[in-house]
Amino acid sequence: MTTFVDRAVIYAKAGDGGNGVASIHREKFKPLGGPDGGNGGRGGSVILRVDANASSLLHLHRAPHQRAKNGAPGKGGNRSGADADDIIIPVPDGTVVTGQDGEVLADLLGDGAQLVVAQGGRGGLGNAALASTKRKAPGFALLGEDGQEAEVVVELKMLADVGLVGFPSAGKSSLVSVLSEAKPKIADYPFTTLVPQLGVVSAGGTNFTVADVPGLIPGASQGKGLGLEFLRHIERCAVLVHVVDCATLEPGRDPASDIDALENELKEYGGLANKPRIIALNKVDIPEAEDLAELVVKDLEKFGYPILKVSVVTHAGLDQLAFTMAKFVEEWRATQEALHEEAPRIVIRPKAVDDQDFTVVVEGDAYRVRGARPTRWVKQTDFANEEAVGYLADRLARLGVEEELERLGATPGATVIIGEEDNAVVFDWRPSIYAGDGPAAGPRGTDIRFME
């Protein structure tokens, strides 16, 4: 049974906001009690949050569809609807979230780091919140906003300092078990390691983590073997260690050709060219392997990497290997600290107060109004209520939409579209002579601008 999953695609649907309610306070001997409709509750959001106890994305693999609940509608007596609970999804440290287009949305590092994948919709205002000195008893309320929908890719990239790469059965798992207290599965057949293994190593006062990545083979960057599936786990490493099997009996294999093949796969994968390397010639406890290691040292110097001869059986060279790893890790950490100190300050520039936040585009004989506020206002409007539609017209007029329509040559009866193509509202434009806050207001739920 699968117990380790490092990639999942999730489909998140946030909860819709609850509708506001239109209500009038009713009490004996108080016929004009005034509006008392409460606001709708906020819909629940879908949130990814780093949890120190999470080690896999298995739970997302098993339940990729995450749907939050809707907010409760408002009630009379100035009672607001309850907000829906957010869905908090625990993910491991080092989780990267990308959109379907490959854009990185968040790199979640550190316990408690989070990303709101889908934002819950805001609740609609009740008529008590919509009352004003001119509209004392609104006969309508606003509808709740729709919750966001999103489809994202969640990938785990382990936060290891050192990555061990090499052909299957090169001895990577054995190295991790000897250098640390980790107990990975070890056997004499290929692909013993099916998931990345982490071990903590201490050398010279430096503590660092070592990742045993499943064996690479030629063609791994094109999907052969298991290498490509797990290469993402060494992207954050400070140094890579080529673990070379000097005792292999496979024909056509030798340390130099093994490293050439692995370097080619790392190059094809991309993003790993600037990482330091260490070459560990393993299994030198075997006489033939030790002789081969002695012979190939000169040939391997062309790579320009430190070369160490090690044995997990006799522990020969392991201390030197650990201290060499620690040296590279310390240098990398110092570089990262310097980068953080030199990071530019983030300057937040809010939009201007008079920013209209809308555009009007001529599309043939029609005029399309785009913008966050007009689109949101349309979704909040109950079109079965004339007074609510009149309120929408007032809001659009105050925003300046009618002035822009006139400037572009729109005439009474012109087709006006508000919103995007897949979810738009189409109506015939009738210019407002006066705003509905004043004499346009009629009986509750009506607006004289809609009367014959």
Image: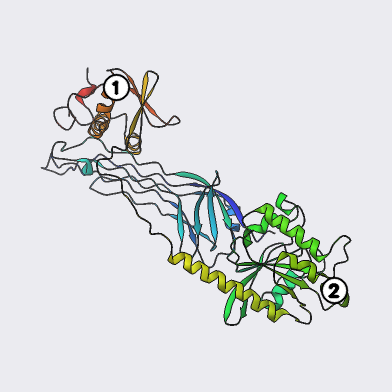
Looking at the image, residue 166 lies above or below residue 404 = below
Label 1 and label 2: CA atoms lie apart by: 86 Å
Give the amino acid at mark 2.
Answer: Ala
Mark 1 neighbour class, 10 Å CA radius: few under 14, some 14 to 19, many 20 or more? some
Q: Which residue is mark 1?
A: 429
> Which image quadrant for residue 32?
top left
Quick one: which residue is furthest to the left in this view?
29
| Image quarter of the C terminus | top left
Give the foreground label among 1 and 2.
Answer: 2
Q: Which residue is mark 2?
A: 289
The percent coordinates of residue 202 (x first, y second) are 61, 79
* Number of marks: 2
Q: Earlier in the sequence, mark 1 or mark 2?
A: 2
User: Which residue lies at the image location 25% right of the left edge and 32% below the top edge?
Assistant: 400
Looking at the image, residue 194 lies above or below residue 389 = below
Query: Taking 159 as reference, is 399 left or right?
Result: left
Mark 2 neighbour class, 10 Å CA radius: few under 14, some 14 to 19, many 20 or more? some
Which is nearer the eye, 172 or 348? 348
Which is nearer the eye, 97 or 389? 97
Q: Mark 1: which secondary structure? A: loop
The answer to whether residue 62 of the structure is visible from this angle is no
Looking at the image, residue 131 lies above or below residue 339 = above
The percent coordinates of residue 9 (x first, y second) are 58, 49
User: Which residue lies at the image location 82% right of the left edge and 79% below the top edge?
Assistant: 285
Give the amino acid at mark 1.
Answer: Trp
| Image quarter of the N terminus | bottom right
Q: Mark 2: which secondary structure? A: helix
The percent coordinates of residue 284 (x first, y second) are 81, 76
Residue 449 is tagged as: none
The answer to whether residue 434 of the structure is visible from this angle is yes
The percent coordinates of residue 16 (x first, y second) are 40, 44
